[in-house]
Image (cartoon, rainbow, N blue to C red):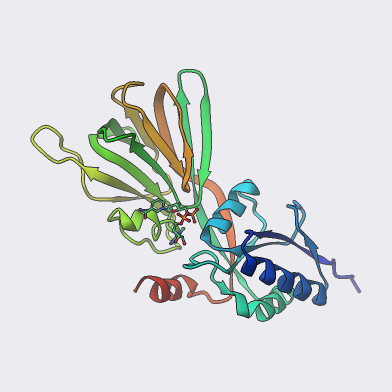
Amino acid sequence: MEEEMTKKANIFANLYQLSFEVKEKVIKELIDNDIDVSETFHPDADFNIVIGGDGTFIKAVHDSEFSSIPFIGINTGHLGFYNDVKYYEVEEAIKKLKENDFILNHLKVIDCEIITDDKTYTYNSINEIVLKAKYTSIMNFDLYVDHVKLQTFAGDGILFSTPSGSTAYNLSAGGALLCQNLNAFQITPLAAIRSSLHRSLDKSLVVPKETLIRLVPKSRGDVPFSIGVDGIHKEHDNIREINIKLSDKIINKIVFNPDWFWINIKEKFI
Ligand code: NAD
């Protein structure tokens, strides 16, 4: 008979007292279920267990460099969109991990390429990439969808969100809520100017995976803008163009109920 390999779990947790207590409980349950524990990222692990809030989940995804090891989030924070396992349900959740009694949901990821005069920078995001004018200035850029120059945009900025990120910043900016399973991403303007001078589209667009978005700033250098990658601030000078598309990477999220997305929406947004 073939011997079953011992499973291993990486643990990510924030530093709050409740997370510390839940982490102790998680470690005990993992050991009791013969699952090895690693408190540093191990590339051969079977699970990434995140204890904290959505910020901890997002950080774990970035710190693990968008690891393909399945993630499970245990909520000790407030909203818990990604971290949807309640901290008092740990025992049951770990039993299900041991028995492989779960399904994987594939969360989409955005690829962002920033081409400056000197260098090209690449970023991935699980929620959104936001480009915003700094200070109180207006951001002007040409927006290309595939090979078509769709518009010259003027306004506060623009946001590109994944379906799982559609409930975050995108929702506050007036974007639509996208169903998780769509292989698509959303482009949402921030305070688009519509006048006889500026004809910026003030509605969000939902585009399929294959779509390539190119953004060319109208004035380079003198009206700087900031870039947010899942809430992490980036700054680059002399940007020539920015390319956005849906990535071939995905984040595997462990779910126990195929309807988790709608349950989450009902519990947390309605
Ligand atoms: P944070 O601590 O400032 O939390 C922001 C809030 O967003 C938290 O309540 C978190 O639970 C929630 N959140 C994060 N991802 C979510 C998702 N996919 N669906 C629903 N809610 C979600 O910062 P953080 O925890 O590091 O999160 C960074 C995120 O904050 C960014 O990716 C951005 O989406 C969001 N944000 C929102 C606004 C806004 O709504 N005006 C502004 C800035 C940042």
Quadrant of the rendering where the C terminus is positioned? bottom left
Residue extending farthest front: 17
Q: Which residue is located at x 66 percent, y 76 percent?
A: 90
Q: Quadrant of ligand 1?
A: bottom left
Check the image and report above or below for 154 versus 175.
above
Q: Residue furthest right?
A: 1
Q: For the view shown, which residue lies furthest in the top direction?
A: 117
Instruction: Report the residue at 68% width, 71% height from top.
Output: 21
**Residue 154 at what x, y percent from top left?**
23, 35
Q: Is residue 97 left or right of residue 16?
A: right
| Residue 33 at x, y percent in the picture | 79, 76
Q: Residue at x 52, y 30 (%)?
A: 121
Question: 180 above or below 28?
Answer: above
For the image, the number of numbered tags is 0
Tell me the residue at 81%/77% (across/down).
Answer: 32
Nearest to the observer: residue 259 or residue 266:
266
Depth order, front residue of 232/206? 232
Q: Is residue 66 above or below residue 261?
A: above
**Residue 261 image point, x, y percent:** 46, 70
Q: Quadrant of residue 106?
A: bottom right
